[in-house]
Image (cartoon, grey):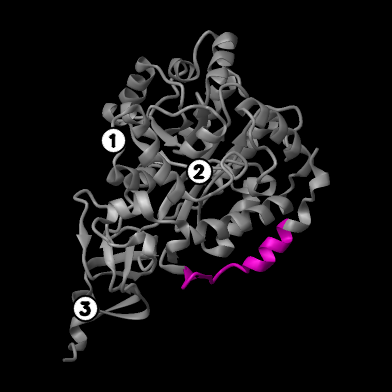
């Protein structure tokens, strides 16, 4: 029976027919559900029959036999490190940094970063990652590529006091450069200004303090590496008499607008300080394992009430930008201490979605499928034998799903991948451009 015109409302996109895992506070799953989208925003989530009756859509994705869920949030990465993937394996964090920092000074330019980020976005979209917090040089080039692709990138000026920064901007000039960058930013739903201070071992306490003051002036998120391994902690303690998190706390930098990457080597009082101040953490289990850094005390952080999102780190330290892999690793690695409930499937999925958005201070806009939020979502094909039978969507995602199961990826209501075909990026051209930049002889 036809529906009277007055009962229907315009929609740009209707994703319908699959089970919708909303990742809302109640963990609602809508069997044979749908998501209606208009102007980049979710209009409604509910039973497919109801939404088809209420909305006439200009485009649709039939998700029958699939799982629809919020787009994955990469809470810590260095996207343009795709340029160096596979070139610093089986080394410690300090050995890794020694190689990579030297190579960056030789290879990086705005053009090279743009080419590397284009491939990183292609990889991310294929894995259902709809946004990422990206700390790297030449962020303007990365933003341009992301804007062209329609992908949600959270980035901004990076501070790292090294002798020859790849972008040629000496530390003494970076504050004014960053101020101009922040002042010129337009505020859009689903984004916020960001500043990056590399770490407590590449920036002095005075530098960290002035960077934090600039971030607070503009209401920006401040993102810092901290306590990634025991050697880093010992280095900072010897230099300043305090461990990295202790130092940040003594400087008054901990707080709800600070997101720390890694936090592998933490004491009980440091965990309490993070909880007390509302400081968030980006957990990068794959990178931490590969570099031999250890395993972050995520169960203790969660028990203390600390917000924990998931990151991949760069494609040199983890060799992948696959957040589903980080999700599965996080759900498994913490069980090694003997507690199979340490990080459960639902908790791991939440870390990759709504908790990652919360860590960025963007949970009002991203991370779950709810009316009024930005329409960032993925459609995961459940047809593979490794996903059968389907008893529980949280379990499926944490323990069985692969990036190759992602069929469609939508960012801000725009379909960036339909039927496993990228729609806004020329993938073959992007790969060819990256391959032309580096040959094995370039890196010794």
What residue is disc 3 on? 54
**Label 2: how many residues lie within 10 Å, few (<14), some (14-19) or many (20+)?**
many
Q: Residue furthest bottom?
A: 1
What residue is disc 2 on? 312
Which label was assigned to residue 340? 1
Q: Counting residues from the N terminus, which is met first, the one under dot 3 or under dot 1?
A: 3
Distance from Cα at disc 3 to Cα at disc 1: 44 Å
Q: Element under label 3?
A: helix
**Label 1: how many residues lie within 10 Å, few (<14), some (14-19) or many (20+)?**
few
Disc 3 + disc 2, Cβ < 8 Å: no
Q: Residue at x 74, y 44 (%)?
A: 108
Residue 428 falls within the magenta-colored stretch: yes
Q: Element under label 2?
A: loop
Looking at the picture, how far across and down is residue 266, in whole percent? Answer: 42, 20
Q: Residue furthest right?
A: 441
In front here: 156 or 233? 233
Q: Residue at x 40, y 45 (%)?
A: 327
Residue 78 can be seen, yes or no:
no
Q: Element under label 1?
A: loop
Mark in the foreground, 3 or 1:
1
Q: Quarter-wise, where is residue 410 in the image?
A: bottom left
**Label 3: how many residues lie within 10 Å, few (<14), some (14-19) or many (20+)?**
many
Residue 420 falls within the magenta-colored stretch: yes
Looking at the picture, how far across and down is residue 194, in whole percent? Answer: 50, 41
Which residue range is magenta in the image? Answer: 416-434
In front here: 185 or 43? 43
């Amino acid at each position: 029976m036809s529906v009277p015109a007055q009962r229907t409302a315009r929609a740009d996109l209707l994703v319908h027919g699959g089970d919708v895992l909303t990742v809302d506070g109640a963990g609602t799953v809508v069997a044979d559900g749908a998501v209606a989208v208009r102007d980049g925003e979710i209009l409604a989530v509910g039973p497919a029959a109801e939404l088809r009756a209420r909305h006439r859509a200009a485009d649709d994705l039939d998700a029958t036999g699939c799982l629809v869920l919020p787009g994955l949030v990469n809470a810590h990465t260095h996207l343009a490190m795709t340029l160096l993937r596979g070139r610093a394996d089986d080394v410690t964090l300090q050995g890794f940094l020694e190689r990579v920092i030297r190579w960056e000074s030789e290879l990086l330019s705005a053009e090279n970063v743009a080419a590397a980020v284009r491939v990183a976005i292609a990889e991310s979209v294929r894995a259902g990652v709809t946004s990422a917090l990206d700390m790297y040089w030449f962020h303007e080039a990365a933003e341009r590529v992301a804007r062209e692709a329609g992908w949600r990138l959270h980035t901004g000026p990076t501070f790292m006091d090294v002798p020859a920064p790849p972008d040629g901007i000496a530390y003494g000039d970076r504050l004014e450069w960053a101020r101009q960058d922040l002042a010129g930013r337009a505020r859009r739903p689903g984004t916020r200004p960001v500043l990056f201070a590399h770490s407590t071992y590449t920036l002095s306490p005075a530098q960290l303090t002035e960077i934090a003051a600039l971030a607070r002036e503009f209401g920006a998120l401040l993102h810092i590496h901290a306590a990634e391994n025991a050697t880093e902690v010992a280095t900072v303690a010897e230099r300043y008499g305090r461990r990295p998190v202790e130092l940040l706390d003594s400087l008054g930098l901990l707080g709800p607008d600070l997101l720390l990457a890694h936090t592998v080597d933490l004491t009980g009082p440091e965990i309490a300080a993070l909880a007390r101040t509302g400081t968030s953490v980006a957990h990068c289990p794959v990178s931490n394992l590969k570099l031999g850094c250890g395993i972050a005390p995520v169960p203790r952080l969660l028990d203390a009430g600390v917000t924990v999102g998931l990151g991949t780190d760069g494609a040199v330290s983890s060799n992948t930008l696959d957040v589903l892999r980080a999700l599965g690793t996080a759900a498994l690695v913490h069980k090694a201490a003997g507690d199979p409930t340490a990080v459960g499937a639902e908790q791991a999925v939440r870390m990759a979605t709504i908790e990652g958005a919360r860590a960025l201070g963007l949970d009002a806009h991203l991370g779950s499928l709810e009316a009024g939020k930005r329409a960032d979502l993925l459609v995961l094909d459940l047809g593979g034998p490794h996903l059968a039978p389907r008893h529980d969507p949280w379990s499926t995602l944490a323990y069985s799903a692969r990036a190759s199961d992602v069929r469609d990826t939508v960012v801000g209501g725009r379909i960036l991948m339909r039927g496993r075909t990228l729609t806004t990026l020329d993938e073959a051209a992007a790969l060819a451009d990256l391959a032309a930049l580096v040959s094995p002889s370039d890196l010794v």
